[in-house]
Amino acid sequence: MVTREKRRAAWPVRAAGMGLAMVVFLFLLPLLLLPGREGEEEPLPTATLPVAEPSAAAVEGVSPVEGWDESQRLRLLTVEGTVEELSLGDYLWGVTAAEMPASFELEALKAQTVAARTYCLYQREGGGEKHPGADVCGDYTCCQAYLTREQAEAGWGVDAWRYGEKISQAVAETDGLVCLYGGEPIDAVFFSSAAGRTADALAVWGTEVPYLKGVESPEGEEVPGWQTVVTIPRGEFAETLLAAYPQAELGGEAGGWIQGLTADEAGMVTSIRIGGVEMSGGQARSLFGLRSAHFTAEAAEEGVTFRVTGYGHGVGMSQYGANAMAGEGKSFQEILEWYYSGAKVGEM
């Protein structure tokens, strides 16, 4: 029979044994949590980028970006006509996904994100005039294109998680950064691709903007559809022109319909006479559905042929040019300060 005194005498021994066991357990615990030996590793995720596993927020379709962007709220007029309130971070994720291919270099995506942030803040002051009840809209012909995460992922298919994380990184690593001129956000316009040089705002829109000057742009044949040829049949061409300019004269031989084509240093058409009507290259581009105002035109009996290079209005940052610069090792700051002359990247 074990007496009470014997049990009490055994307590210190038992306590010492339990303490020793606890020390051994705590010492071995980190070893138990280490990865297995060579040949026993867990399979790697299918994504090829060196990024972490998706967070719970990313899985649920919520941007994991935190910081200044997330503290800012804005009202977005969607293409469906509804007004939605969301954080600037979520808005920028959707704009970057919509405006630039996610396969582009990360530094190009960062440049796009900063340009989009800057453009949004610049427009927000006048958003009430353009869009009552909203700061910006999701129509690319007016403000900036925008996609929800679900819409973007549906288009990316099997690359959805990888591209989504890449854009989240572009937004997070440029949090709160904008392009400034004279300490104020600029009108950071951008377009798809140039024909070797961007255009001066004065030449395209008739307005002098000190930071929207023409500069060299390095993209070229790698751009899909960089050079296009558009031939409009004679009857269709005449119908289109006369609907917009009833005073146009298209008598005589078709070879004489087009005259007086002039272009600026970037090769953008500044003026052209068609059927005796003088118009800008931008007006001709819009009228005949051309990809840019960098074109030549030739009229013949069978129709009018336009040979076009580049895509977009040509002012500000070229997106394919930004990607080419990023491929050469340029940072997003260097890209932005190249395309927006005299502007500086800084914090809001």
Image (spheres, grey):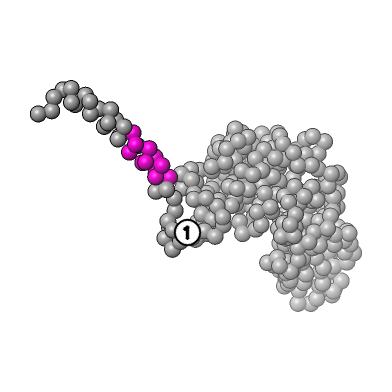
**Relative to 271, 312 lies left or right:** left
Residue 81 lies in quadrant: top right
Q: Secondary structure at mark 1?
A: loop
Residue 163 locus on image (x, y percent): 56, 55
Does the stretch in magenta take in 324? no
Dominant secondary structure, magenta? helix
Residue with the mark numbered 1:
44
> Which range of residues does the magenta coloring cover?
19-30
Does the stretch in magenta take in 21? yes
Which corner quadrant holds the N terminus?
top left
**Relative to 6, 114 lies left or right:** right
- Out of 334 and 258, give the one closest to the viewer: 334
Residue 146 locus on image (x, y percent): 60, 48
Which corner quadrant holds the C terminus?
top right
Residue 151 locus on image (x, y percent): 52, 52
Residue extending farthest to the left is 1
User: What's the residue at 39%, 40% (across, down)?
Assistant: 26
- Out of 290 and 219, give the one closest to the viewer: 219
Residue 75 locus on image (x, y percent): 59, 36
